[in-house]
Image: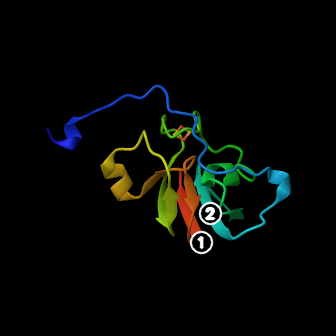
Amino acid sequence: MPGDRVHQELFYADDEPVREVHHAEAGPSGPVSQVTVTLDGRSTTSALPRERTILEGAQQTRPDLPFACKGGVCGTCRALVTDGKADMRRNFALEPAEVDAGYVLTCQSFPVSDALTVDFDT
Ligand code: FES
């Protein structure tokens, strides 16, 4: 059966830690990326540590970013990478065509390149 004919619904994902999460007060201690997020037509750029997810890092300056499960299941945090590279660790929500088009789950993706731009409006 072709893969695009298979649909699955996931209501639970193991609470497997993706990586260690640091508190915001600690500040970046390792390499950072200049990450630009666009939501509702407004763009914000900040230096985010590469060991934190894009969502967790960017929420420090953009608390309005959309999310729900933070487990890679719901797809609420979906955004399009328009510049740079991100590393998505888990994905239970996006279709292969969306991933091929450049969409990531920002709650499961880490900045990789020196500069990264993600667009939540697409
Ligand atoms: S918040 Fe649910 S997949 Fe990211």
Is 66 displayed left or right of 104 in the figure? Answer: right
Please provide percent x and percent y for residue 118. Answer: 54, 59
Tag shown at residue 36: 2
Farthest residue to the left: give it. Answer: 1
Q: Which residue is mark 1?
A: 115
Please provide percent x and percent y for residue 15. Answer: 58, 35
- Ligand 1 within 8 Å of disc 2? The answer is no
Q: Quadrant of the N terminus?
A: top left
Ligand 1 picture quarter: top right
Between marks 2 and 1, how big is the CA–CA gap? 8 Å
Query: Callout 2: 10 Å neighbours few (<14), some, many (20+)?
Result: many
Q: Number of callouts in the render? A: 2
Q: Secondary structure at mark 1?
A: strand
**74 or 17: nearer the eye?**
17
Query: Callout 1: 10 Å neighbours few (<14), some, many (20+)?
Result: some
Is 18 displayed left or right of 75 in the figure? Answer: right
| Vertical arrangement, residue 44 with respect to residue 91, above or below | below
Question: Do labels 2 and 1 touch, CB within 8 Å?
Answer: yes
Which residue is located at x 81 percent, y 60 percent?
27
